[in-house]
Image (spheres, rainbow, N blue to C red):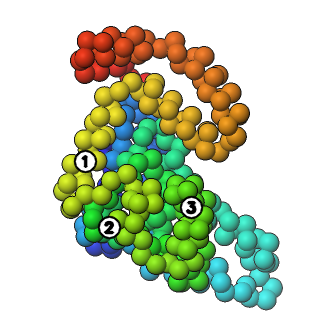
């Protein structure tokens, strides 16, 4: 399954419709037995320029403007709850990629800025073209990256120092450096080669048992967020059910005969 950010005239900036449609899309794919893997990409010249500041300008103005005297509907307590709901809604939209049990492959070309980095950090496998670059741009406009980059990036690259440098400086993080840091799995010469690899990888994953694939993602995510002991216990409970699947003998038989995996029943 291929999902494309399609606002090329706005450099794939992330507006309110984007966040609503992204969550609806991935929550739907999570429940769709026909979807076995997802390739996420961007149309046009760049992957994403991040949050649509033009559309959100009014929202930011309302957040930063003190309430008029006597306006009891916008006192600090109520205003803070409204802002928290606004941020949490966008966080939940991007988290839909993480909680989707299907592996999500992200194919990044050219610029990936601000909220675009938050989005990419929520995917499972990250690929890029050689012209790709990332920038955690929020500090340059007086913001703290609040949609997932601060929580996910240090774990993805395994270096608190590099993660903090990228956050504090907003500098460009080119594809070659991102590959060396472990943020990317591969870098390709151009967008065409990138997409060919992403689709090929998605097809390879989709040909495997959905019980194995979805179980692997669910347990990887659980292990990331819990102790080793807790994750092992979770895995044992998971396996006590999932090892009873008929996919295992079917896959073993194909492997012994050196044949491609058989078609597996939907999950």
Asked if residue 190 is positioned above or below residue 33 in the image, the reply reads below
| Dot 1 and dot 2 residues touching (CB under 8 Å) | no
Taking the image as drawn, is residue 21 in sight?
no
Residue 150, how many percent across, how many down?
Answer: 59, 64
Q: Earlier in the sequence, mark 3 or mark 2?
A: 2
Q: Crowding at label 2, few (<14), some or many (≥20) Cα neighbours within 10 Å? A: many
3D distance between C-alphas at marks 1 and 2: 15 Å
Asked if residue 247 is positioned above or below residue 10 in the image, the reply reads above
Which of labels 3 and 2 is toward the front? 3
Helix, strand or loop at mark 3: loop
User: Where, by quadrant of the figure, is residue 82 drawn?
Assistant: bottom right
Helix, strand or loop at mark 2: loop
Helix, strand or loop at mark 1: helix
Reading the image, the residue beneath label 2 is 132
Asked if residue 71 is positioned above or below residue 52 in the image, the reply reads below
| Dot 3 and dot 2 residues touching (CB under 8 Å) | no
Looking at this view, name the residue that lies furthest to the bottom. 69
Reading the image, the residue beneath label 3 is 159
Quarter of the image where the N terminus is located: top left
Determine whether, in the image, residue 263 is placed left or right of residue 193: right
Q: Earlier in the sequence, mark 1 or mark 2?
A: 2
Residue 137, how many percent across, how many down?
Answer: 49, 77
Q: Residue at x 53, y 19 (%)?
A: 242
Q: Earlier in the sequence, mark 1 or mark 3?
A: 3
Residue 74, how many percent across, how many down?
Answer: 74, 77
Quarter of the image where the C terminus is located: top left
3D distance between C-alphas at marks 1 and 3: 27 Å
3D distance between C-alphas at marks 3 and 2: 21 Å
Which of labels 1 and 3 is toward the front? 3
Q: Crowding at label 3, few (<14), some or many (≥20) Cα neighbours within 10 Å? A: some
Q: Residue at x 53, y 77 (%)?
A: 138
Asked if residue 199 is positioned above or below residue 84 in the image, the reply reads above
């Amino acid at each position: 399954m291929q999902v494309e950010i399609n606002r090329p005239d706005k450099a794939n900036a992330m507006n309110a419709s984007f966040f609503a449609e992204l969550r609806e899309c991935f929550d739907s794919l999570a429940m769709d037995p026909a979807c076995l893997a997802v390739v996420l990409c961007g149309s046009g010249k760049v992957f994403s320029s991040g949050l649509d500041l033009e559309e959100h300008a009014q929202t930011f103005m309302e957040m930063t403007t003190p309430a008029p005297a006597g306006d009891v509907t916008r006192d600090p307590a109520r205003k803070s709850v409204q802002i928290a709901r606004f941020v949490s809604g966008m966080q939940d939209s991007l988290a839909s990629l993480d909680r989707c049990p299907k592996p999500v492959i992200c194919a990044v070309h050219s610029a990936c800025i601000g909220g675009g980095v938050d989005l990419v950090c929520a995917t499972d496998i990250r690929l890029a073209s050689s012209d790709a670059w990332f920038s955690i741009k929020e500090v340059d406009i007086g913001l703290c990256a609040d949609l997932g980059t601060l929580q996910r990036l240090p774990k993805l690259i395994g270096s608190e120092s590099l993660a903090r440098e990228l956050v504090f400086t907003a500098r460009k993080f080119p594809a070659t450096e991102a590959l060396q840091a472990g943020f990317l799995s591969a870098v390709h010469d151009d967008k065409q080669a990138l997409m060919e690899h992403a689709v090929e990888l998605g097809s390879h994953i989709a040909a495997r048992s959905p019980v194995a694939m979805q179980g692997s993602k669910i347990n990887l995510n659980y292990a990331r967020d819990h102790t080793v002991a807790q994750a092992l216990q979770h895995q044992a409970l998971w396996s006590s059910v999932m090892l009873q699947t008929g996919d295992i003998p079917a896959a073993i038989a194909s492997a012994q005969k050196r044949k491609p995996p058989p078609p597996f029943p939907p999950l």
